[in-house]
Image (cartoon, rainbow, N blue to C red):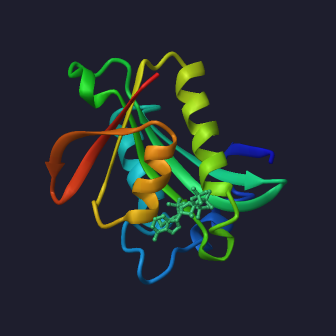
Amino acid sequence: MKIVLKPIDETNRDAVIALSVRKDQPFVAPNDYSLKQAEETNAEYPGVARPFAIYAEDRLVGFCMFAFAPEAEDEDDRYWLWRFMIDKSEQGKGYGQAALDEIIRYFREHGADVLYLSTEPENECGVHVYHKAGFQETGEIDDGEATFILKL
Ligand SMILES: CC(C)(COP(=O)(O)OP(=O)(O)OC[C@H]1O[C@@H](n2cnc3c(N)ncnc32)[C@H](O)[C@@H]1OP(=O)(O)O)[C@@H](O)C(=O)NCCC(=O)NCCS
């Protein structure tokens, strides 16, 4: 399955904003909110927020956003998978796991040695795919979200 992460631009921005998850999946912010957050973050810390559209076989299926901050003083703040979602109509087809492989590859290829993320422990599907990709709980819970780490 060919998964490609493409930067957000005027050709895909509206379609990315239109992607959404099911009502019983309140685990990710709406994509328009994330894109605004990316702009604000990059105004202060250029290049740190890296939002991408996820394409499977040339079809837009999801969205992810990274925090990529190699200069951050605290090692734990450098590399985060900040947002990750597959549209509700495209879930359960293996795209999430394949996209996660691509995401991990991106961080490795850009010199990261570790990748963090956090999610609610109730997010059973998310926790399942993160464990399958090799992420492990650090034991930290912040604002109701468990932190996961993958050493690259
Ligand atoms: C998490 C998410 C990205 C996964 O994407 P996806 O395309 O559906 O994932 P895949 O089809 O590749 O794989 C789903 C896996 O979860 C499993 N699964 C599905 N529902 C599950 C549940 N309720 N509990 C446990 N596992 C579940 C499937 O069986 C499959 O695993 P398997 O291949 O070992 O059988 C997607 O569900 C999503 O966008 N969720 C809402 C937003 C979210 O939670 N984002 C993460 C925030 S940190």
Which quadrant of the view contains residue 15? bottom right
Left or right, 132 with respect to 145, comes to: right
In the picture as drawn, the residue positioned furthest to the right comes out as 57
What residue lies at 64% left-to-right and 38% top-to-bottom? 102
Q: Is residue 56 above or below residue 140?
A: below
46 vs 147, nearest the viewer: 147
Picture coordinates of residue 126 (x, y %)? Answer: 44, 58
59 vs 104, nearest the viewer: 104
Q: Is residue 95 above or below residue 52?
A: below
Picture coordinates of residue 74 (x, y %)? Answer: 21, 22
Quick check: can you spot residue 58?
yes
Left or right, 57 with respect to 127, comes to: right
Q: Is residue 144 above or below residue 88?
A: above
What residue lies at 47% left-to-right and 22% top-to-bottom? 152
Left or right, 15 with respect to 133, comes to: right
58 vs 39, nearest the viewer: 58
Which quadrant of the view contains residue 127? bottom left
Q: Is residue 111 above or below residue 137?
A: above
Picture coordinates of residue 57 (x, y %)? Answer: 84, 53
What residue lies at 44% left-to-right and 84% top-to-bottom? 23
Picture coordinates of residue 41 (x, y %)? Answer: 36, 43
What residue lies at 33% left-to-right and 27% top-to-bottom? 78
- The mark tally for this picture is 0
Quick check: can you spot residue 8?
no
